[in-house]
Each structure stands twice: as structure tokens, then as C-alpha cells.
Amino acid sequence: TKLALAFGLFTALFVAVAAMAVLLMQQENDRFTHYVTIDEARVKLAREVLEATQRRAIAARNLLLVKDAAQAQQERADVESAHREVKLRLAEPKTIVARDAESGDSTGQNLFNDIERVEARYGPVALRSVDLLMTGQKAAGAEQMNTECRPLLASLTRAAERFVEHGVSRRSQDKEQAVQAFQAARRDLVLASALSLLVAVALVFITPRRILRSLGAAP
């Protein structure tokens, strides 16, 4: 009975340490998955929003410079393509910022809302300016770009840059937390393994003595 109890205890310790190792490995895998699918995606999508707005602004500005009708049509097509891309890119981060808000961090949601508010004003103005330029009203188009588009574009760029900075900051924070969690998990696993080893060594010395004593042999 004593031998069975000793082996049972040893087996229980072995299973406990193995289960702990599996659990810690799963937690590390979850953190890595979060880093790749959430943190990296947050930064990537934020930068894509910023780049799309900049491409649209550049194409619209080029309409003031080109004189050839074919080039003007190409620039207009570039503006419209970039405008569609902005709408597409703005749709993609919504799930991530909503998840952040649910977890208690509403900063990303607020910054993203700022982008949407400014874009709702800037997008239509930019397209109207393009229409004016394409219909030969260059003076009116240029005036609207200078008085309305430029300030709104500056606000949109600042809002997008803040969103990018937030994504980079969150990525760094999550990475640091993951490193700290890994170090703590490694320490706990080492301690558990060391404790199991000490118990196993103790069982090796104690169990035979108790068995011999129960059989009437000298301790």
C-alpha cells in the first residue's frame, strides 16, 4: 500500500507538472497569436489608412499641375480609386478597435472615431474640388482646395498619425507584457519541476525504509 501511494504521488506530481507546462505553452501561443493577428494588424491597418488618404490628396493636387486632358483623366481616376480605398481601409480596423473598447481600452476607438469624423467632411470636399477642376473651373477648384481641403487634410493626417502611434504603442505594451508573462511562467515551471524533483528524491529514500520497517527489517 505504501509503495502504491508513493508511486501514485509521484505520478500525480508528474501529471501536474506536465499539465502546467501544457497550459503555459497554450498561454504563450495565445499571446503570440494576439500579437500577430491583433497588434501587427492594428499597426498595418492604421498605416494603410494614412497612406490611402495621402495618395488621394496627391492625386487631387496633381490635377492643378497637369494640362493634358488624358493625364487629367488619369489623375481623376487615381483620386476616385484612392477614395474607394480609404473607405475600404476605414472599414477594416473597426473590429479591432471595438474589441479594444470591450476590453477597457477606448483610446483606439476614440482616435478612430476622430478619423471617421474628419473623413466624413474632407472626402466630399475633395471630390467637389476635383469636379470643379475637371469642368474647367480651375480657379474655383484651387480656391476650395486651399481654403477647405488643406485644413481638413491636415486634420485628417494628424488623426491618422495619432491612430498609427497608438497602434505602435499598444504593440510595444503587449510585447512587454508577453515577455514578463513568459518570464513568470518559466519561473513557476522551474519551481514546480524543482519541487517535484525534491519530492521524488525524498520518496526514493523514505519509501524503501518504510517498506522494510513494515516487514520487520531494521530501519
Image (cartoon, rainbow, N blue to C red):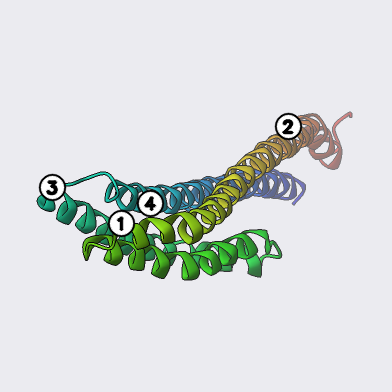
* Tag shown at residue 218: none
Q: Residue at x 46, y 52 (%)?
A: 37
**Nearer to us: label 1 or label 2:** 1
Question: Mark 1 highlights which residue?
Answer: 82
Label 3 sits on a secondary structure element that is: loop
**Pointer 1 or 2: first along the chain:** 1
* Tag shown at residue 197: 2
Q: CA distance from mark 2 to mark 4?
A: 67 Å
Residue 24 relative to residue 154: left or right: right
Q: CA distance from mark 4 to mark 1?
A: 9 Å
Residue 128 relative to residue 27: left or right: left
The amino acid sitting under disc 3 is Asp
Q: Residue at x 58, y 50 (%)?
A: 158
The amino acid sitting under disc 4 is Ala
Please state which of residues 214 and 178 is positioned toward the viewer in this rendering.
Answer: 178
Q: Residue at x 74, y 52 (%)?
A: 1
Above or below, 102 against 71 in this view is below
The amino acid sitting under disc 1 is Ala
Q: Residue 126 appears in which quarter of the rendering?
A: bottom left
Q: Residues within 10 Å of mark 4 (few under 14, many from 20)?
A: many
Q: CA distance from mark 1 to mark 2?
A: 64 Å
**Pointer 2 or 4: first along the chain:** 4
The amino acid sitting under disc 2 is Leu
Q: CA distance from mark 2 to mark 3?
A: 82 Å
**Pointer 4 or 3: first along the chain:** 4
Question: Mark 3 highlights which residue?
Answer: 68
Discs 4, 3 touching: Cβ within 8 Å: no
Q: Residues within 10 Å of mark 1 (few under 14, many from 20)?
A: many
